Amino acid sequence: MMTITSSISAQPLDEFLEALLAIDRFAARQILSTYGQRAGTVNLFEQMIVPALEQIGAQWEQGALSLAQVYMSGHICEEIVDAILPPAQIQRISHPPIAIAVLEDYHLLGKRMVYASLRASGYEIRDFGQVTVEALVAQVIQERIAVLLISVLMLPSALRIKELRQQLERAGHRPKIIVGGAPFRFDEILWQEIGADAMGKTAIDAVTHVGRLLKELP
């Protein structure tokens, strides 16, 4: 199991992780409510939700967890974030359209973590789900997406992002593209070769890149 450094003690983090793996929504929410009052919304997320999902991802990669546990854990965390920061909440950040997608892949944990991280940080983000290059191009153009986050698991999917970029540019639309996933961790210059604007290794990286790239928009 990964070691997480946190200002919240290991006990509530372990309890929260246990509740997620048991698919116990009530317990998960109670733990965050009990131990998170003093931390603030964003700190609570960074110190509890993200570390728990990182541990779940590591255990899944080691074959210690089922895909159902991974899926439901991410789903519960999304529900909790929605409860903490509902879409209409006044403090949400005003910004151009942002979207996230999994490109021609079925591994959703990374996308869930980034999506939840952005929402916890106050951003509104559109979730395009699992899509093909052609479908993603159409959605990005139709909704005039300014910042697009793409998660992939396999190298062939990562390489198709270059094609995605080219199709968008031919259509006269050039969003900022942030990529993440295993191929980019193995090859640290791959994101540049496919025409992305940034690469994130963690969910918190993605939040940082979104903030920076939004400031660079005309």
Image (tube, grey):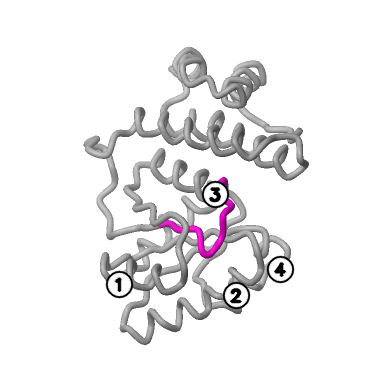
Type of the residue with mark 2: Leu
Q: Earlier in the sequence, mark 2 or mark 1?
A: 1
Alpha carbon separation for disc pair 4 and 2: 12 Å
Q: Which residue is mark 1?
A: 141
Q: Is residue 1 above or below residue 32?
A: below
Q: Earlier in the sequence, mark 3 or mark 2?
A: 3
Quadrant where the image shows the N terminus = top right
Callouts 4 and 2 close, C-beta under 8 Å: no
Alpha carbon separation for disc pair 3 and 2: 18 Å
Callouts 4 and 1 close, C-beta under 8 Å: no
Q: In this picture, which residue range is highlighted in magenta?
A: 100-109
Q: Secondary structure at mark 4?
A: loop
Alpha carbon separation for disc pair 2 and 1: 21 Å
Alpha carbon separation for disc pair 4 and 3: 21 Å
Q: Earlier in the sequence, mark 4 or mark 3?
A: 3
Judging depth in this view, the residue of 199 and 18 nearest the camera is 18
Q: Which residue is mark 2?
A: 159
Callouts 3 and 2 close, C-beta under 8 Å: no
Q: Is residue 137 above or below residue 25?
A: below
Is 167 left, or right, of 103 in this rendering?
A: left
Q: Nearer the viewer, mark 4 or mark 3?
A: 3
Quadrant where the image shows the C terminus = bottom left
Q: Which residue is mark 4?
A: 187
Label ID, residue 108: 3
Label ID, residue 97: none
